[in-house]
Amino acid sequence: MKFLAPTAATIFLSFASHPALALADDPPFQIRQTSLKIEIEGVLGDAGWADATPIETWYETRPGDNLPAEIGNVARLVYDDQFLYAAFEFSDPEPEKIRAPLANRDNVPSYTDYGGILIDANNDGSTAQMFLANPRGIQYDAISSDASGEDSAPDFFWDSAAKITPEGWVLEMRIPFSSLRYAESNPEQWRILLYRNHPREFRYQFFSSKLPRDSACFICNSTPLVGLRDLPSGGHFVLAPYTTGAQSSAPVGDVGTPLVSDDAISEIGLDAKWLPNPNTVLDLTLNPDFSQIETDAPLISANERFALFFPEKRPFFLEGTDLFATPLTAVYTRSFASPRWGARATGEFKGNTYTFLTGEDRGGGSVIIPGPQGSDLVDQDQESVVTMARLRHNFGDSFLSFVYTGREVEDNSYNRVLGPDFRWQVTDKDVISGQLLFSESRTPNLPDLSDKWDGRNLSGHAAELWWYRKTKTWDYFTLYQDLSNEFRADNGFIPQVGIRRGFGELGRSFYPKDKPITRLRLFTMASYREDRDGNVLSRFLLPGFGFDGLLNSFVRVEFLLSEQRSGTELIRRNQIRPRVVLRPGGILSQIQLRATFGDEVDFANDRKADGLSLGLELDLQPTDHLKLSLDVDQRKLDVTTDEGLSGELFKAQVAQLRGTYTFSSKSWLRLIGQWLRTERQPELYDSPEDVTPLSESLGGSLVFAYKLNWQSVLFVGYGDNRELDRFDRLQPASEQVFVKLSYAFQH
């Protein structure tokens, strides 16, 4: 559990309660049907709102403990035969301090004002669709799950409009029933949470339900919503064809020689979605465009032993995304690198939810080959058929589930993984979760790519069990993992196998009143990891503290006392890890500083080192239209060799600068520059002949976007990448111009 969620619209999952408590405290909200027209303009003058009963009782859940809200919040809910409508009047005694920059969709950070609803249309008390918007009408949508947390990757079709007034701000929302997932046209009830984020000197959060601090779930606190009748029974579909065009240039020879343009290429494809009924979704994609319009977060890979995880952003994989979230990451959809086609069904029946995905992968990605002390990435250039499926049966706010993944490669190699998992809400304070997986594999016979790819057969298991307990002031978490040497999950993200691991965390929270600090948490973590022969791989004790304070700030400091194996050596490592986040608002929207001081392990040479890691994230908002973001990381190691040589083994630096000018909620222009540089001293390595003294790259892109909605878009862009030539000068390595046009036809 995160002490402070650092991303936009993330709400404290730990401040929650058991469904029975929520139902006992909160009477149902009554929603009425209207036949009168409602225009979404950010003005509540339409006659249709007269049918709505104002909801005026709200609670300050942060920093206060379910106190009556001191500023006014009024919500209204109505519906017609196609849409659910929500309207909000948010009072503000200082409307000039409202933080509402223009931005791209889903870019609604926690240090800005926003509000909206969380709808649990399946009435299961554990998963909800989130629809939020800021005072400029900029939208944020997500799936929030008590089992897997919040995922902002899914997008839905809906409309919003907002206006700042002398008294505060007004928000109107219109959500098509086709964007919601429900089982009955005449439901007994749904569940709903109404929400407002109000950051000033502290981050204030207001909800329409009480969120007690002594429990272990969040969505379970939602209030029943009754009165919905004769809802649409299905038949909705979306067809989203696209076309792209691109032309690339590359050096005629080595880097530094003149660029030569390739022939222009164009692609066409189609994404299709059909809802035969409100709770069954069928997706089909043909030759999908999975190019990354958003650049991945810059990450330093130097001195890393395991593969790096990147989040999924591709639309085809995002329907019911929470269904692929399991204790062990058995499904990692980015392993499905280049689909020629894909098909998926997602739905619910009689308390069961399911998703089934299959398709043909043209290859071009990488396969993780895991081990006890590190993992390797091997190119996967062969075609394969990929299958991913999960079936989950819900028991109130608990569930029992079964997952299967398979990859059948054209050379008759394969990987198949299956097994159950569960989540048991034992009490309102206790949650137990676990998973057991079994795998059968045959590796490709390609020893030139990896000495572990020799056509061998493998079989293994992976297991995880954890318990979480939350009281008003104490929280406990314990976990045990057991992964055999031959377990493989080629469609997942499990980069370490052949281990047994135990982990525990104990925390104590304090909530000062009328102080510069609103929450203080003291904690201690401990972990022990060994291989299958009983050899210690790592063990650590990590005490620390964290607190929320003025300037909407968060501070966390960790003290690490550990031992880490590298090769045959068990190396002692002691570190201090501070992190400071300030969100004062205005031009300086956010600044985040992070550092690691102390001992490190030189994994390339199996020895102890002195390490230093520094990171800076800076968000500036000079105007409501312009945002500048800087992300800088630096890591270095100092070592002494057995021969007595001392010095800086390597220094790795990565920096990314983004500038985005948002013309309106539908269009923006973005410039990105990203620089990576790693300097090494070969004489300090055990095998200096294998070491590249310097690597460096500089990339940039300029993109213009116009969006009617998240699937009706126009992108026009230019990209440039530069690498070192043989004289260590940055020279053009590639250039590209591209255009993409897609349009969503809805019925």
Image (cartoon, rainbow, N blue to C red):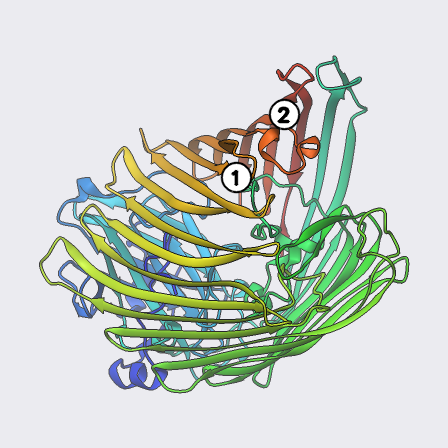
- Helix, strand or loop under label 1: loop
- Helix, strand or loop under label 2: strand
Q: Quadrant of residue 38?
A: bottom left
Q: Is residue 632 above or below residue 216?
A: above
Quick one: quadrant of the C terminus?
bottom right
Q: Amino acid at mark 2?
A: Asn
Can you identify the residue that label 1 sits on? 298
Judging depth in this view, the residue of 449 and 671 nearest the camera is 449
Can you identify the residue that label 2 sits on? 721
Judging depth in this view, the residue of 479 and 12 nearest the camera is 479
Dots 1, 2 in contact, CB < 8 A:
no
Residue for point 47% across, 58% down: 563
Is 703 left or right of 472, judged from the image as shown? right
For label 1, the crowd category at 10 Å Cα-Cα, with few meaning under 14, some 14 to 19 and many 20 or more, is some
Report, in whole angstroms, how far the alpha carbon at label 1 lies from the one at label 2: 15 Å
Q: Position of residue 663 (x, y in %)?
A: 43, 31
Judging depth in this view, the residue of 392 and 592 nearest the camera is 592
